[in-house]
Image: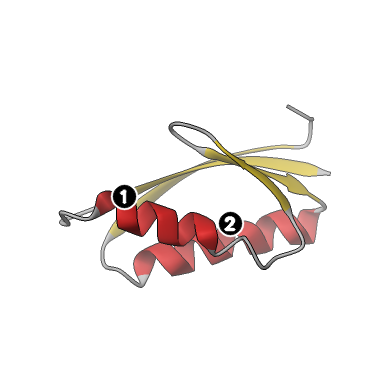
Amino acid sequence: MLCAEVSVYPQKTNSSSDVINKSISSLSNENIKYEVGSLSTHIDGNDEQVWNGIKKVFEAAKSSGEVSMVVTISNSTH
């Protein structure tokens, strides 16, 4: 089992909230457990689910323009 804490930081936009919400919503159709916090989103699952979830979030965010993403990965539970 892996856990990831993901924070998305859109660059050069006046619609940061829209970009962040779009990136998080990309997880809604995935078979993955996630919890949205005030500054980051926690993703839990097996290795493949978590890595795919991280990729989905980044792909959705970057489709809106330049973005930075900070990820902390752990193999322990929260």
Above or below residue 4? Residue 50 is below
Q: Amino acid at mark 2?
A: Ile
Where residue 71 sits in the image (x, y, percent)?
Answer: 52, 43
Marks 1 & 2, CB-CB < 8 Å contact: no
Q: Residue furthest top?
A: 78
In the depicted view, which residue is nearer to us: 68 or 18? 18
Where residue 73 sits in the image (x, y, percent)?
Answer: 64, 40
Query: Which label number is shown at residue 17?
Result: 1
Along the horizontal axis of the image, is 42 left or right of 76?
left
Identify the image quadrant of the N terminus.
Answer: top right
Above or below residue 77? Residue 43 is below
- Residue sitting at 66 percent across and 68 percent down? 29
Q: Secondary structure at mark 2?
A: helix
- Residue sitting at 74 percent across and 44 percent down? 44
The answer, for residue 10, to whether it is visible in the render is no
Query: Which label number is shown at residue 54?
Result: 2
Query: Which label number is shown at residue 25?
Result: none
Where residue 78 sits in the image (x, y, percent)?
Answer: 73, 27
Along the horizontal axis of the image, is 31 left or right of 69?
right
In the depicted view, which residue is nearer to us: 49 or 27? 27
In the depicted view, which residue is nearer to us: 36 or 66? 36
Q: Nearer the viewer, mark 1 or mark 2?
A: 1
Q: Residues within 10 Å of mark 1 (few under 14, many from 20)?
A: few
- From mark 1 to mark 2, how far is it between C-alphas? 18 Å
- Residue sitting at 26 percent across and 51 percent down? 16
Q: How is the image coloured?
A: secondary structure
- Residue sitting at 43 percent across and 33 percent down? 39
Q: Residues within 10 Å of mark 2 (few under 14, many from 20)?
A: many
Q: Earlier in the sequence, mark 1 or mark 2?
A: 1
Where residue 22 sits in the image (x, y, percent)?
Answer: 43, 61
Q: Amino acid at mark 1?
A: Ser
